[in-house]
Image (tube, helix red, strand yellow):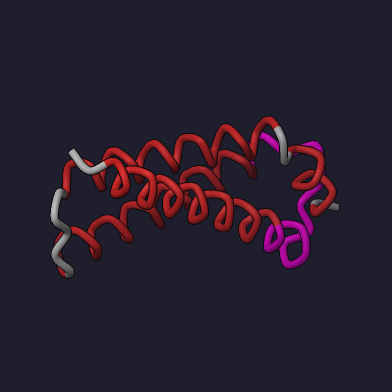
């Protein structure tokens, strides 16, 4: 079992999740001018968008380009996505709220 695949894919899932979270909050705050009181709704939208982004990445990476052990890659990427969602909710809450109006 190659743990470097799990670590690399976990970091990829984490980076994708946090990046999409920040992008959705920025777009909702600047373009749509959503109020701060709708944080939970915007966070739910961002979590769903980040899941779609990670799913598209996994679909591309596993189906198109060959991965030596796709099960480990899948587990690491989904674990990184969950860690990114949890990190966004716990540690980035103030920053994400500040991007809303």
Residue drawn where x is 13% and y is 55% of the image: 68
Q: Residue at x 62, y 41 (%)?
A: 43
- Magenta segment's dominant SS is helix
Residue 46 magenta:
no
State left or right for residue 24 relative to residue 9.
right
Q: Position of residue 40 (x, y in %)?
A: 66, 34
Q: Position of residue 49 (x, y in %)?
A: 47, 52
The relative height of residue 83 versus residue 51 in the rendered view (above or below) is above
Is 35 in front, or is 92?
92
The residue segment tinted magenta is 26-41
The image quadrant of residue 6 is top left
> Quick one: quadrant of the N terminus?
top left
Numbered circles on residues, count: 0
Please, is residue 101 above or below residue 43 in the view? Answer: below
The residue under the point 65% across, 55% down is: 22
The x and y percentages for residue 3 are 29, 41
Judge by depth and name the residue closer to the eye, 58 or 41.
58
Residue 89 lies, in percent from the top left, at 65, 33
Q: Is residue 25 left or right of residue 13?
A: right
In the image, residue 79 sits, relative to residue 33, either above or below, namely above
- Rendered residue at 31%/59% (across/down): 56
Q: Is residue 51 left or right of residue 99?
A: left
């Amino acid at each position: 079992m190659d743990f470097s695949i799990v670590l690399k894919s976990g970091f990829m899932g984490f980076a994708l999740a946090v990046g999409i979270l920040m992008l959705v909050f920025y777009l909702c705050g600047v373009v749509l001018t959503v109020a701060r009181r709708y944080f939970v709704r915007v966070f739910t939208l961002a979590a769903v968008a980040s899941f779609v982004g990670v799913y598209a990445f996994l679909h591309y990476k596993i189906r198109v380009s060959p991965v030596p052990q796709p099960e480990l890659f899948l587990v690491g990427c989904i674990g990184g996505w969950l860690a990114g969602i949890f990190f966004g909710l716990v540690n980035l809450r103030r920053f994400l709220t500040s991007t809303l109006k």
